Image (cartoon, helix red, strand yellow):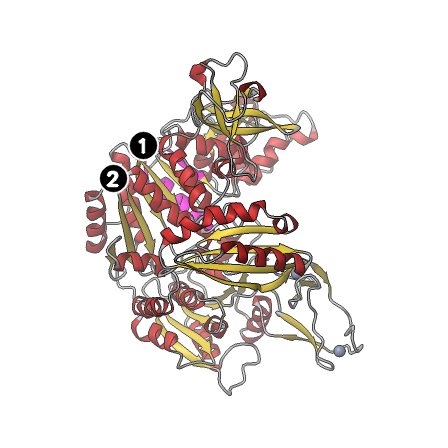
Amino acid sequence: MPFVLRVAVPVPLLQVFDYLPPRDAPPASLRPGTRLSVPFGHGRRVGILLDVGSDSPLPLDRLKPALAVLDPEPLLTGEMLDTLRWTAHYYQHPLGEVLQTALPVGLRSARLAPPGGERAWALATPATDATHASAPAKNASAAAPRAGSRAAQMLGLLARGPMNAAQLEAALPGWRSAAANLRRRGLIRTILQPATEMLRGRIAGPALTPSQQQSVDAIAGWSGAFTPILLEGITGSGKTEVYLAAIEHAIAQGRQALVLVPEIGLTPQTLRWFRERLPGTIAVLHSALADGERTRAWLSAARGQASVVLGTRSAIFTPLPRAGLIVVDEEHDASYKQQDGLRYNARDLAVVRAKALGVPVILGSATPSLETLANVEAGRYRRLHLGARPGAARVPELRVADLRGRPAPDGLAIESIAALRAGLARGEQGLIFRNRRGYAPVLMCRNCGWHAACARCDKPLTWHRGAARLRCHHCGAEQRVPPQCPQCGNVDLAPQGLGTERLEQALAKLFPGFPVVRIDRETTRRKDALDDLLTSIAPDRPGLFVGTQMLAKGHDLPNLTTVIIVGVDEGLFSVDFRASERLAQLVVQVSGRAGRALKPGTVWLQTHQPDHPLLRSLMRTGYAVAARTLLAERREAVLPPYAHMALLRAEAPAPAAVDALLQHAFELAGNPPGVTLLGPMPAPMPRRAGRSRGQLLLSADERSHLHAFLPDWLAKIRASAPARRVRWSLDVDPLDLY
Ligand SMILES: [Zn+2]
Ligand SMILES: [Zn+2]
């Protein structure tokens, strides 16, 4: 009987491809989930074997043999492979591309998987030769580093034996640049050592509060069965302690835990906590890792060696042969949604995987998403609530700074300035939040009204004064600042509106003698920069932080008592139906930075709408009640989570091509039962990077109606002529309508 291999190949086509087995591959090596090198077109690709059959719709003599079996053991098996098939169907994305997305970059090419083990750093020569006293410089580049420098400290540590990344991180924060430097100079090398369950000086956590203990007990009671749990608790209520205790319980049962954190949540501090507090090996997966490190971390989880996988969005695709628990921290965070290619939502996939694996999944947040709250309301999710903060810390007080009819030349209300001044005088810190980087969002001519705009996006360019550049925040285009108005020649070009850079300057002028630290994408490019900036003002010294939503996370600021939120009104009047939810979450998250220790905190919301019901509700009754009101509005308007959406996006240089595809797609749809089509219409940003953009929105009361309709419709669109002239994609459960 012949063997026919069905292989998923990473190409934008829905079908799988049939191959004959590679010559002289033993049948036992042909197991589903194994990578195969296969000929494809004029080249070769790395595909995943799905199954082995005995026939093919094609004549067997036309099938080509696969070139090689790449893995001795399959990489994607059981639940992981099933979940990925489900993912391909749910998001209507080609299976070959879905499987490729799941693999770390290092395993997407025809390279063999590295052997088990972990990377460690060791002295290039035996320890006795590298001590400062007996290391005569053989040449200039190998000279011993300056005594007391990080490099010298690192050599001292490694003289006692090789160390892995976790050990180095604990012993010598910021060691990576020293390691790179020493390696360049030939003083150290990297080795692979057997992954060992490291004996670390484990630090015991604080005693749990009664409500933390109740949550931990409840979660332990649900272990071994699919149980989605909303763990709700205000910022600083100690959700992390509950995660750690629940993970420890899972590890004690011989199980693995997967922990997802938002992109800006994976700080060195978080890593340190997990490493100090949990036994066993922790595999860390995030986008800043080198390919090799990422591959090794992924494999150590897939091989069952790591007991904890800690990572950002894409870590959801890590195989867990001994799964016991999944945790999604800050489950409301928008960074769980992938915004291109396979547009999955890692929070939602966490629930899907927990179900398939039969384990509890904890969704933690101080400001749960409306989707999750609706699931709690419907009785599908359990809810655990963490009460007051441990110790005497209090929730900060929310107040409104009314901007109506009152000048705020520096963008700061009179109340805000007074509050910051009083706090500084008491020796405390303040935080000014503004979700716009740069100096000013618009540079305008006072004489004729001209403003600098991106020629490719039709949107104003942001003035970055320090860098003396105009930058487009949508497409990245940049240009120098014109010395005069290109339209009328006037030299009086003036900034309109304000960004973090302008606020920084205003604050420095208002409060001379106090440090002002700006935190946004500009100032935090370097690795670890966020933590370095947050610790640049000593905890017991007065000072000010100004920045974007990066400030909502990171290092604790116990001496922070005043928070000013600038630009609240933009969130109140957005066309996006999720804007109110996001604003409420942001206000509560940023507020949570204040008053975390014993000092009470105050938060000022600067607005022209002091009586807006959302702000009133947040101030009087907090997020939970405000969210309930927002949910009622969504139900009324039949919007998610009470409707299920998919968005067909199209873009092309010529607007006519976009219109043609969307119109054709609309006609192909006919009148699908239970599905409403909205559009075709221009995207909220109709032009970006020189391309016209349009969309067609689909909405259904029942998810099943949507998914019954999508496959055939998309197949027809794919086969149509207009689809070949535009770039188009489908986004199931879109977060942004952009
Ligand atoms: Zn002008
Ligand atoms: Zn642009």
Q: Amino acid at mark 1?
A: Arg
> Is 269 a magenta residue?
yes
> Is 434 a magenta residue?
no
Magenta stretch, residue numbers: 263-284
Q: Residue at x 47, y 31 (%)?
A: 296
Quarter of the rendered image showing ligand 2:
bottom right
> Callout 2: 10 Å neighbours few (<14), some, many (20+)?
many
Residue in front for this viewpoint, 7 or 425: 7
**Residue 276 percent location from the top left of the image:** 35, 41
The secondary structure type at the circle numbered 1 is loop
Residue in front for this viewpoint, 149 or 491: 491
**Residue 651 percent location from the top left of the image:** 62, 55
Residue 249's tag is 2
Q: Residue at x 21, y 50 (%)?
A: 213
**Residue 647 percent location from the top left of the image:** 49, 56
Q: Please, is residue 225 above or below residue 71 in the view?
A: below
**Residue 271 percent location from the top left of the image:** 41, 44
Residue on which the image places disc 1:
322
> Callout 1: 10 Å neighbours few (<14), some, many (20+)?
many
